[in-house]
Amino acid sequence: MYRITAIIFTLFCYALTLSAQLPVTVAELTVEVGANSEENLYYGFETGDLLIASLELLEGKDLKAFEVIEYPENSRILEYETEGFDDKRLKVYQRGIFQFRLHNANLVKKRVCRIHIKRLPSSAATADFNPAVRWEERIDTTFKVQSETVRSGTEVKEVQQRRRMLAKVDTNVVTLLDKLERVHSRTNISADNITRLTFELPRNRQEPSPEDPSLTTEVTSWAYWIGTGEEAQEWYQKANGSAVARLAKGLTKGAISVGLVSSGYGALAMLAIEGVSVFTNPPSGENVKYALLLKQGDEYLELSSGNSITGFGRMDNFTQGQFAIQLENDNYVEGINVNVKVVAVTVTKTYRDEYFTETREVPVNQSTTVREPILRKVRAPVLVEGERQ
């Protein structure tokens, strides 16, 4: 009889133990997660609890992310692209708040989820723990730490200085356009009697930086020449001969080199660099109507124009950008061959560093650390303690 009583008592104690460890429902609810948004749930858990979470999607293919975070930032469970799951479990090592984050990345459709959150207490003593959370506002204080420099006096000392000195200046003539263009007559049915030749001036540059360059290159001026037929070409070569003679007599400023003159651009280079023209009165021949254009956006602005067998000019006020030379043949029957040449003058300056010392009265500075408090009102979850569910 005693043995039977002992067995019954043992079974009764075992049954009590089992009942103490039955899961307790914390929340069982349907959550709607809007398109491209997320929903967050907050519940408390006691030390030793086993947190159990289940998720079922009632509407929608999947959920971008489901995450369980031990508040405020310790991620304990993270499921990507989930279609639902049963009984995800994790151990609670200390009393605290857990955040359940449901994220829907779909830009159009919402998600409807059924979530079941349970806790398995570690003992009967914690079975009645209240998982409710309330929100309270509090002042969060952080400190901005920065170093400030305070002037504490002056002292006389030798200071090394650097200055940029001009070391070299190079003048170059760059060919932008050298073309023989056929301009058709007004009665030509297969081609227009107006043509346009485009070109762009070299871009100014400062290396390694505009603020402190060791080398600069800029366009200072440019010149163009237009000539129709062989008569104009012979006239241009005659002008080049005059440029050579002027150079031989030492009448140039020194920027024109023998190489530039002998290259076939002597007269045009002299016009571009010095603004001196050695072109004489133009010969007889077929005329061409021409216009010098500056591109502004999608349109062209006319800078100058003419109507002659030859034309030339120098520009020093528009030294950057895109340009065009427009040619028009007003002859009803005959087409014309037009020579067009454009050159630009670039000046490259090279600098060198020169170091020197000078005596100066300089400030003596002292560094000090300043902590500036920053007050911020925050809203945070707090466990509801001492309350029954």
Image: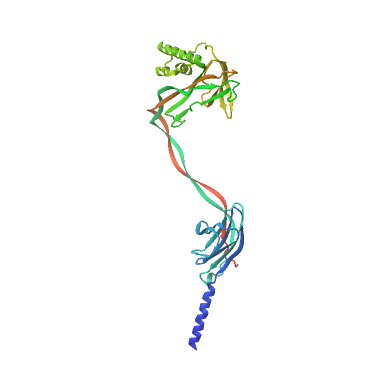
The colour scheme used to paint the residues is rainbow
How far across and down, in percent of the image, does residue 173 sit? 45, 22
Point out residue 365 in the picture as x, y percentages from the top left corner. Answer: 43, 37
Height in image: 362 above or below 134?
above
Task: Determine whether, in the image, residue 169 is placed left or right of residue 84.
Answer: left
Q: Quadrant of the C terminus?
A: bottom right
Residue 195 in view, yes or no: yes
Q: Is residue 118 above or below residue 237?
A: below
Total tally of numbered discs in the picture: 0
Residue nearest the observer in this picture, 342 or 211: 342
Above or below 67: residue 16: below
Q: In the rendering, at what x and y percent does residue 367 appear?
A: 44, 41
Q: Quadrant of residue 196?
A: top right
Residue 306 place in picture, x, y as percent? 57, 17
Who is closer to the viewer here, 26 or 157?
Answer: 26
Location of residue 62 with respect to 272 vertically, above or below: below
Residue drawn at point x = 51 percent, y = 83 percent: 8
Residue in view at x 51 percent, y 80 percent: 11
Give the residue displayed 52% in from the left and 80% down from the top: 12
Horizontal side, residue 126 vs residue 158: left or right: right
